[in-house]
Image (tube, coloured by chain):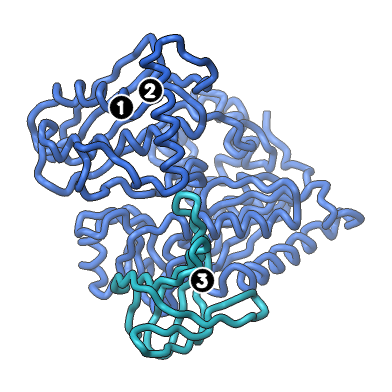
Chain colours: A cyan, B blue
Amino acid sequence: MGESIQEPIAVETALTHIGIMPARILWKQRVYVCTSCGMHHTVYEGDTLFHIFYMTTKEACMQIALNTKTLRWTLVTIEAI
Amino acid sequence: MTYEFSSHQPTVLYIDINSCFATIEQQAHPQFRGKPVVVAAYTSKNGCILAASYEAKKVGVKTGMRIGDALHLCPNTIVVSPDPEKYRYINHQLTGLLHSYSPHVQVQSIDEMIVRMDNAPYLSGVLQSAVLPSMMTLARGIKKRIAKEIGDYITVSIGIAPNAFLAKTASNLEKPDGLKAITKENIRSVLTTLHLTDLCGIKQGNATRLLLAGITTPLELYDAPIERLLSAFHSINGYSWGMWLHGYEVGSLYAPHTDTQKSYGQSCAVTKHVTPHDTYALQILYQLVAKMGIRLRKDRCRAHGMMVGCSFTDGTYWQQRKKLSGALYATEDVFSLTQSLLIQAPTKPIHTVFTGVYDLVGDLYMQLPLDEKEQVKQARTAALDTLVSRFGQHIITTGLALGAEQKILDRIAFGKGGLHH
């Protein structure tokens, strides 16, 4: 399993044929280009809806979450490929 | 008297997600694909495996096995904790997809669904002789849509038959990614390839009953007259077995789920060396009761009965029940009673703590209490529940459990119970 990070990140999204998807992730001043999305699902914490994405980049697999109340992205876990 | 095979067309689809939890994890984590993956309740060596990927199954890893044994068989097995939200999401996605074919979609469990296509527009105008080819085309279409809309790594086995029992049997014939049909024409040839225990519902007990009646194979069970089946099972079940094997829909085994909740329970395996009288055991008990209380009140219920128990590391078991004239709903009341019972338990190291409420009445907050203290308690409990629904389950706790690690994790229950949070 990946390493738990729980740090804020910046995410650039793109509109694709399956909806809006993360395209690039900026974490610790490094840009990760997303190559594919393994899965996307939603989860409620209290009444806050989070979108969870499992993204693959050339360097690592990342689980990222979008808090729909604050519109902030979080890097949840990361695992090197 | 013997049975005739049903004249009903094979319009029932049984859809089973292959190695559900493990495949969903492989879908989410592309780095796990093609590797042995197991999903286990606890990732410690004694943790029980809930699902194994096909790569793990190939080397002998099975559901129910301990992690330690799996790692012994296959040292590079990837062990993953369950993520119930992910599995429920896939279940809801698949249910939605299936509803686009028929309004009669029955969710059997987190990974199994029945679709009844009788009277569905898809089959309108289809000749009787063309029903099976149409159903096979439909099943292939469902598989394609699952790959495209839900996940390209998620595969399902689909069974087609005149009733749900045979459709389930058909879905088990080929795994993973299977598609098989059982009809009047091939039922005998299919049954010759199976053992009695391959039939869903026949395990050691029923197999022994049948062996004692001289029935050793599914084909003999299929050919047995009603009287012989009734005497073999010593109950009406004998009649049902004959009907199911001949394509009829009888009994409640695959009937739409209409039961209401009869009890609520929570349990937790304890990893530390603690006895029922230690503070840690009480902290766990509080967390169990708090989660159970939220579920109870969410369904607007109160309970007249409560129980608490533990199993010990020496293999023994202790349990106490209490019936009350007044009904309980507040976490503080349930905890206070369970705590008073738990201290009567023997002082031995605990393996698992469990608690439950039963004898339910669905009248929570329906009547304003006359007693002022009760009014305050009702308002307080409702306010706490509002906090939980707004900020999440772990936002507030009692002083006793403050600082304690959250041990009560979200789990998928077997059967239909796992579909709800």
| Amino acid, disc 1 | Glu
Cα–Cα span, label 2 and label 3: 44 Å
Badge 3 crowding class, 10 Å Cα cut-off, few under 14, some 14 to 19, many 20 or more, is many
Q: Position of residue B238 (x, y in %)?
A: 56, 30
Callout 2: 10 Å neighbours few (<14), some, many (20+)? some
The residue drawn where x is 72% and y is 48% is B116
- Give amino acid for label 3: Met
Say what secondary structure mark 1 lies in.
Answer: helix
Disc 1 sits on a residue from what chain? B
B354 is higher (above) or lower (below) than A26:
above
Q: Are marks 2 and 3 in contact (CB under 8 Å)?
A: no
Identify the element where label 2 is drawn: helix
Closer to us: B43 or B234 = B43
Residue B70: quadrant of the picture: bottom left
Q: Is residue B225 left or right of residue B69?
A: right
Disc number at residue B377?
2
Which comes before the other along the chain, label 2 or label 1?
Answer: 1
**Can residue B188 be seen from the camera position used here?**
no
Give the residue at mark 1.
B332
Asked if residue B203 lies left or right of residue B128, the reply is left
Q: State the residue position of label 3.
A: A39
Measured in 3D between alpha carbons, the distance from the residue under mark 3 to the one under mark 1, in whole angstroms, is 40 Å
Q: Position of residue B113 (x, y in %)?
A: 60, 51
